[in-house]
Image (cartoon, rainbow, N blue to C red):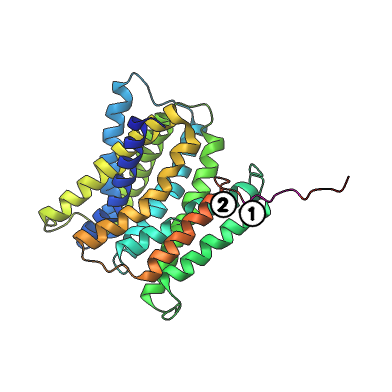
Amino acid sequence: MKLQHLGVLLLLGALWGASFMFIKIGGAEMPPDTLVAARLVLGALLLLVVLYGSGQRLPGGWLLWRDFAIVGMVGLIAPFTLITWSEQIIPSGQAAVLNGTAPLFTALIAYGWMRSEHLTGIKLLGVGLGFVGVVIAVGLTDVSFSSAGTQAQLAVLLASLCYGVSGVYSRQAFKGLPALVPATGQLLAGALLLTPVALLRNGLPSTLPSAVAMASVGALAVFGTSIAYILLYWLIERIGATRTSMVTYLVAPMALVYGAVFLREQISANTLVGLGLVIVGILLANGVIALRTQPVAKPV
Protein backbone atom coordinates (compact mmCIF):
# COMPACT_ATOMS: atom_id res chain seq x y z
CA MET A 1 0.00 0.00 0.00
CA LYS A 2 1.36 3.43 -0.93
CA LEU A 3 2.09 5.90 1.83
CA GLN A 4 -0.61 8.23 0.48
CA HIS A 5 -3.24 5.48 0.68
CA LEU A 6 -2.14 4.51 4.19
CA GLY A 7 -2.40 8.13 5.28
CA VAL A 8 -5.96 8.44 3.95
CA LEU A 9 -6.88 5.13 5.63
CA LEU A 10 -5.59 6.42 8.96
CA LEU A 11 -7.42 9.71 8.45
CA LEU A 12 -10.69 7.89 7.75
CA GLY A 13 -10.26 5.80 10.90
CA ALA A 14 -9.58 8.98 12.88
CA LEU A 15 -12.69 10.71 11.51
CA TRP A 16 -14.99 7.77 12.22
CA GLY A 17 -13.41 7.25 15.62
CA ALA A 18 -14.06 10.91 16.47
CA SER A 19 -17.72 10.50 15.48
CA PHE A 20 -18.42 8.67 18.74
CA MET A 21 -17.01 11.61 20.70
CA PHE A 22 -19.07 14.13 18.72
CA ILE A 23 -22.21 12.03 19.26
CA LYS A 24 -21.54 12.01 23.00
CA ILE A 25 -21.16 15.79 23.14
CA GLY A 26 -24.07 16.68 20.86
CA GLY A 27 -26.37 14.03 22.31
CA ALA A 28 -26.04 15.53 25.79
CA GLU A 29 -28.15 18.52 24.64
CA MET A 30 -30.33 17.19 21.81
CA PRO A 31 -32.86 14.39 21.39
CA PRO A 32 -31.32 11.51 19.40
CA ASP A 33 -33.66 11.84 16.40
CA THR A 34 -33.08 15.60 16.16
CA LEU A 35 -29.31 15.14 16.22
CA VAL A 36 -29.44 12.38 13.61
CA ALA A 37 -31.76 14.41 11.36
CA ALA A 38 -29.39 17.39 11.51
CA ARG A 39 -26.46 15.10 10.73
CA LEU A 40 -28.23 13.58 7.72
CA VAL A 41 -29.46 16.90 6.32
CA LEU A 42 -26.06 18.59 6.51
CA GLY A 43 -24.26 15.48 5.24
CA ALA A 44 -26.65 15.05 2.32
CA LEU A 45 -26.33 18.70 1.28
CA LEU A 46 -22.55 18.51 1.19
CA LEU A 47 -22.53 15.24 -0.76
CA LEU A 48 -25.04 16.68 -3.25
CA VAL A 49 -22.64 19.55 -3.91
CA VAL A 50 -19.74 17.12 -4.41
CA LEU A 51 -21.83 14.78 -6.58
CA TYR A 52 -23.11 17.46 -8.94
CA GLY A 53 -19.75 19.25 -8.89
CA SER A 54 -18.12 16.08 -10.22
CA GLY A 55 -20.60 15.93 -13.10
CA GLN A 56 -22.63 13.03 -11.70
CA ARG A 57 -26.36 13.01 -11.14
CA LEU A 58 -28.83 11.20 -8.94
CA PRO A 59 -30.76 8.74 -11.10
CA GLY A 60 -34.53 8.53 -11.32
CA GLY A 61 -36.69 5.44 -11.07
CA TRP A 62 -38.80 4.48 -8.08
CA LEU A 63 -37.11 1.09 -7.59
CA LEU A 64 -33.73 2.70 -7.01
CA TRP A 65 -35.23 5.32 -4.70
CA ARG A 66 -36.99 2.53 -2.84
CA ASP A 67 -33.56 1.00 -2.24
CA PHE A 68 -32.16 4.38 -1.18
CA ALA A 69 -35.03 4.63 1.33
CA ILE A 70 -34.50 1.10 2.67
CA VAL A 71 -30.77 1.62 3.18
CA GLY A 72 -31.42 5.12 4.53
CA MET A 73 -33.69 3.65 7.20
CA VAL A 74 -31.81 0.44 8.03
CA GLY A 75 -28.25 1.63 7.44
CA LEU A 76 -28.46 5.24 8.62
CA ILE A 77 -31.55 6.27 10.61
CA ALA A 78 -31.81 3.16 12.79
CA PRO A 79 -28.12 2.68 13.72
CA PHE A 80 -27.36 6.40 14.05
CA THR A 81 -30.35 6.86 16.38
CA LEU A 82 -29.62 3.75 18.43
CA ILE A 83 -25.97 4.71 18.94
CA THR A 84 -26.86 8.32 19.76
CA TRP A 85 -29.40 7.17 22.35
CA SER A 86 -27.00 4.62 23.82
CA GLU A 87 -24.24 7.19 24.28
CA GLN A 88 -26.49 9.12 26.64
CA ILE A 89 -25.93 6.19 29.00
CA ILE A 90 -22.66 4.40 28.21
CA PRO A 91 -19.18 5.79 27.37
CA SER A 92 -18.41 6.63 23.75
CA GLY A 93 -15.44 4.25 23.72
CA GLN A 94 -17.56 1.33 24.85
CA ALA A 95 -20.11 2.12 22.15
CA ALA A 96 -17.32 2.09 19.56
CA VAL A 97 -16.06 -1.32 20.72
CA LEU A 98 -19.58 -2.78 20.56
CA ASN A 99 -20.15 -1.22 17.14
CA GLY A 100 -16.97 -2.95 15.98
CA THR A 101 -19.03 -6.14 15.70
CA ALA A 102 -20.69 -4.89 12.49
CA PRO A 103 -18.31 -6.90 10.22
CA LEU A 104 -19.16 -10.05 12.22
CA PHE A 105 -22.87 -9.53 11.61
CA THR A 106 -22.11 -8.80 7.95
CA ALA A 107 -20.28 -12.11 7.56
CA LEU A 108 -23.17 -14.05 9.11
CA ILE A 109 -25.82 -12.23 7.07
CA ALA A 110 -23.90 -12.56 3.81
CA TYR A 111 -23.81 -16.31 4.35
CA GLY A 112 -27.29 -16.85 5.75
CA TRP A 113 -29.21 -14.46 3.51
CA MET A 114 -27.37 -14.06 0.23
CA ARG A 115 -25.18 -17.17 0.40
CA SER A 116 -22.50 -14.87 -1.00
CA GLU A 117 -19.84 -15.93 1.50
CA HIS A 118 -18.38 -19.36 2.22
CA LEU A 119 -18.55 -19.69 6.00
CA THR A 120 -15.79 -22.09 7.03
CA GLY A 121 -15.10 -23.41 10.50
CA ILE A 122 -12.33 -20.84 10.91
CA LYS A 123 -14.69 -18.01 10.00
CA LEU A 124 -17.27 -19.30 12.48
CA LEU A 125 -14.52 -19.40 15.09
CA GLY A 126 -13.80 -15.77 14.26
CA VAL A 127 -17.45 -14.79 14.72
CA GLY A 128 -17.61 -16.61 18.04
CA LEU A 129 -14.33 -15.10 19.21
CA GLY A 130 -15.55 -11.63 18.31
CA PHE A 131 -18.69 -11.98 20.39
CA VAL A 132 -16.69 -13.39 23.30
CA GLY A 133 -14.66 -10.21 23.04
CA VAL A 134 -17.84 -8.16 23.35
CA VAL A 135 -18.83 -10.05 26.50
CA ILE A 136 -15.40 -9.42 28.02
CA ALA A 137 -15.41 -5.75 26.99
CA VAL A 138 -18.75 -4.97 28.65
CA GLY A 139 -18.31 -7.37 31.57
CA LEU A 140 -20.90 -9.69 33.08
CA THR A 141 -21.18 -8.34 36.61
CA ASP A 142 -23.92 -5.76 36.00
CA VAL A 143 -25.86 -7.40 33.17
CA SER A 144 -29.59 -6.94 33.65
CA PHE A 145 -32.13 -6.45 30.90
CA SER A 146 -33.98 -3.99 33.11
CA SER A 147 -30.91 -1.76 33.54
CA ALA A 148 -30.32 1.24 31.30
CA GLY A 149 -26.69 0.26 30.78
CA THR A 150 -27.50 -3.19 29.41
CA GLN A 151 -30.25 -1.77 27.20
CA ALA A 152 -27.80 0.78 25.79
CA GLN A 153 -25.24 -1.93 25.07
CA LEU A 154 -27.88 -4.04 23.32
CA ALA A 155 -28.93 -0.97 21.32
CA VAL A 156 -25.40 -0.63 19.92
CA LEU A 157 -25.33 -4.32 19.02
CA LEU A 158 -28.68 -3.87 17.26
CA ALA A 159 -27.15 -0.91 15.40
CA SER A 160 -24.29 -3.17 14.31
CA LEU A 161 -26.81 -5.72 13.06
CA CYS A 162 -28.48 -2.94 11.06
CA TYR A 163 -25.12 -2.06 9.50
CA GLY A 164 -24.64 -5.70 8.57
CA VAL A 165 -28.07 -5.95 6.93
CA SER A 166 -27.70 -2.69 5.02
CA GLY A 167 -24.17 -3.56 3.90
CA VAL A 168 -25.23 -6.87 2.37
CA TYR A 169 -28.39 -5.35 0.87
CA SER A 170 -26.40 -2.46 -0.64
CA ARG A 171 -24.03 -4.83 -2.43
CA GLN A 172 -26.95 -6.24 -4.39
CA ALA A 173 -29.08 -3.12 -4.78
CA PHE A 174 -26.37 -0.70 -5.93
CA LYS A 175 -24.16 -3.02 -7.96
CA GLY A 176 -22.62 -1.17 -10.91
CA LEU A 177 -23.44 2.35 -9.68
CA PRO A 178 -20.66 4.90 -9.13
CA ALA A 179 -20.01 4.72 -5.39
CA LEU A 180 -20.83 8.37 -4.65
CA VAL A 181 -24.35 8.00 -6.09
CA PRO A 182 -25.76 5.51 -3.52
CA ALA A 183 -23.91 7.29 -0.71
CA THR A 184 -25.65 10.56 -1.60
CA GLY A 185 -28.98 8.91 -2.36
CA GLN A 186 -29.23 7.05 0.94
CA LEU A 187 -28.22 10.13 2.95
CA LEU A 188 -30.80 12.25 1.15
CA ALA A 189 -33.51 9.62 1.57
CA GLY A 190 -32.67 9.26 5.25
CA ALA A 191 -32.82 13.03 5.75
CA LEU A 192 -36.18 13.31 3.99
CA LEU A 193 -37.65 10.45 6.03
CA LEU A 194 -36.40 11.40 9.48
CA THR A 195 -36.58 15.20 9.49
CA PRO A 196 -40.41 15.45 9.51
CA VAL A 197 -40.60 12.82 12.25
CA ALA A 198 -38.04 14.65 14.40
CA LEU A 199 -39.88 17.95 13.93
CA LEU A 200 -43.24 16.40 14.84
CA ARG A 201 -41.80 14.69 17.92
CA ASN A 202 -39.59 17.47 19.24
CA GLY A 203 -40.44 20.63 17.32
CA LEU A 204 -37.97 23.45 16.93
CA PRO A 205 -35.83 24.04 20.04
CA SER A 206 -37.00 26.95 22.19
CA THR A 207 -33.37 27.64 23.06
CA LEU A 208 -30.44 26.74 20.90
CA PRO A 209 -27.95 24.14 22.15
CA SER A 210 -24.56 25.38 23.24
CA ALA A 211 -21.96 26.36 20.67
CA VAL A 212 -19.94 23.26 21.58
CA ALA A 213 -22.90 20.95 20.97
CA MET A 214 -23.77 22.61 17.67
CA ALA A 215 -20.14 22.48 16.56
CA SER A 216 -20.05 18.78 17.43
CA VAL A 217 -23.10 18.08 15.27
CA GLY A 218 -21.59 20.10 12.44
CA ALA A 219 -18.31 18.20 12.73
CA LEU A 220 -20.22 14.93 12.83
CA ALA A 221 -22.09 15.80 9.64
CA VAL A 222 -19.19 17.30 7.70
CA PHE A 223 -16.23 15.19 8.83
CA GLY A 224 -17.79 11.99 10.17
CA THR A 225 -20.35 11.65 7.38
CA SER A 226 -19.71 13.61 4.16
CA ILE A 227 -15.92 13.80 4.06
CA ALA A 228 -15.64 10.29 5.50
CA TYR A 229 -17.79 8.92 2.66
CA ILE A 230 -15.72 10.80 0.08
CA LEU A 231 -12.49 9.37 1.53
CA LEU A 232 -14.04 5.92 1.72
CA TYR A 233 -14.93 5.81 -1.95
CA TRP A 234 -11.65 7.46 -2.94
CA LEU A 235 -9.88 4.56 -1.25
CA ILE A 236 -12.17 1.90 -2.72
CA GLU A 237 -11.41 3.16 -6.24
CA ARG A 238 -7.65 3.01 -5.63
CA ILE A 239 -6.95 0.05 -3.33
CA GLY A 240 -10.18 -1.95 -3.52
CA ALA A 241 -12.94 -2.70 -1.04
CA THR A 242 -11.08 -5.46 0.82
CA ARG A 243 -8.07 -3.39 1.83
CA THR A 244 -10.26 -0.36 2.49
CA SER A 245 -12.25 -2.44 4.99
CA MET A 246 -9.14 -2.46 7.22
CA VAL A 247 -10.39 0.90 8.50
CA THR A 248 -12.77 -1.15 10.67
CA TYR A 249 -9.83 -2.12 12.88
CA LEU A 250 -8.87 1.51 13.47
CA VAL A 251 -12.19 3.04 14.50
CA ALA A 252 -12.66 1.56 17.99
CA PRO A 253 -9.07 2.18 19.18
CA MET A 254 -9.29 5.76 17.89
CA ALA A 255 -12.62 6.26 19.65
CA LEU A 256 -11.17 4.93 22.92
CA VAL A 257 -8.30 7.42 22.69
CA TYR A 258 -10.63 10.35 21.94
CA GLY A 259 -12.91 9.36 24.81
CA ALA A 260 -10.02 9.08 27.25
CA VAL A 261 -8.28 12.31 26.22
CA PHE A 262 -11.20 14.66 25.61
CA LEU A 263 -14.07 13.17 27.62
CA ARG A 264 -12.03 11.75 30.52
CA GLU A 265 -13.51 8.28 30.02
CA GLN A 266 -11.81 5.39 31.78
CA ILE A 267 -10.40 2.53 29.70
CA SER A 268 -10.48 -0.75 31.62
CA ALA A 269 -8.29 -3.77 31.00
CA ASN A 270 -11.44 -5.72 30.10
CA THR A 271 -12.22 -3.23 27.34
CA LEU A 272 -8.76 -3.57 25.81
CA VAL A 273 -8.78 -7.38 25.98
CA GLY A 274 -12.29 -7.49 24.53
CA LEU A 275 -11.36 -5.09 21.74
CA GLY A 276 -8.37 -7.28 20.86
CA LEU A 277 -10.57 -10.36 20.61
CA VAL A 278 -13.14 -8.49 18.48
CA ILE A 279 -10.41 -7.42 16.05
CA VAL A 280 -8.94 -10.94 15.82
CA GLY A 281 -12.45 -12.30 15.34
CA ILE A 282 -13.10 -9.88 12.48
CA LEU A 283 -9.81 -10.84 10.84
CA LEU A 284 -10.68 -14.53 11.03
CA ALA A 285 -14.34 -14.11 10.02
CA ASN A 286 -13.39 -12.13 6.93
CA GLY A 287 -10.57 -14.43 5.89
CA VAL A 288 -7.86 -11.80 6.37
CA ILE A 289 -5.89 -14.25 8.47
CA ALA A 290 -6.23 -18.01 8.39
CA LEU A 291 -5.06 -20.83 10.60
CA ARG A 292 -3.01 -23.17 8.50
CA THR A 293 -1.83 -26.62 9.38
CA GLN A 294 1.16 -28.39 7.90
CA PRO A 295 0.23 -31.40 5.77
CA VAL A 296 1.08 -34.76 7.32
CA ALA A 297 3.83 -36.55 5.44
CA LYS A 298 2.62 -39.77 3.86
CA PRO A 299 4.75 -42.92 3.99
CA VAL A 300 6.29 -43.95 0.69
Neighbour class for label 1 at 10 Å: few (<14), some, many (≥20)? Answer: some
Mark 2 or mark 1: name the one nearer the start of the chain: 1
Which amino acid lies under the numbered mark 2 shown in the image of this protein?
Leu
Task: Kindly state the secondary structure of the residue where label 1 is placed.
Answer: helix
In this rendering, is residue 103 above or below 171? below
Q: Is residue 212 above or below residue 1?
A: below
- Would residue 30 be seen by someone viewing this image from the given angle? no
Which segment is the magenta one?
A: 291-295
Task: Note whether 144 is above or below 157 in the view shown.
Answer: below
Residue at 50% x, 38% y: name it: 242
Name the residue that disc number 1 marks: 122
User: Does residue 115 appear in this view?
Assistant: yes
Q: Position of residue 111 (x, y in %)?
A: 64, 48
Q: Which quadrant of the rendered structure holds the C terminus?
A: top right
How far, Cα to Cα, is label 2 from label 1?
A: 7 Å
Q: Nearer the viewer, residue 297 or 168?
A: 297
Q: Look at the numbered discs 2 and 1 and tell me whether their residues touch, using CB distance below 8 Å.
A: yes
Q: Position of residue 173 (x, y in %)?
A: 54, 35
Disc 2, SS: helix
Tell whether 239 sits left or right of 210. right
Quadrant for residue 266, please give it.
Answer: bottom left
| Image point (48%, 70%), residue name | 135
Res 235 quadrant in image: top left
Amino acid, disc 1? Ile
Q: Residue furthest front?
A: 300
Nearer to me, 260 or 71 = 260
Q: Which mark, residue 163?
A: none
**Residue placed at 58% from the left, 46% from the top?**
287
Mark 2 — residue? Answer: 284
Number of residues whose C-alpha sits closer than 10 Å to that of mark 2, classed few (under 14), some (14–19) or many (20 or more): many
Instruction: Name the dominant secondary structure of the magenta segment.
Output: loop
Residue 187 pos. (x, y %): 36, 40
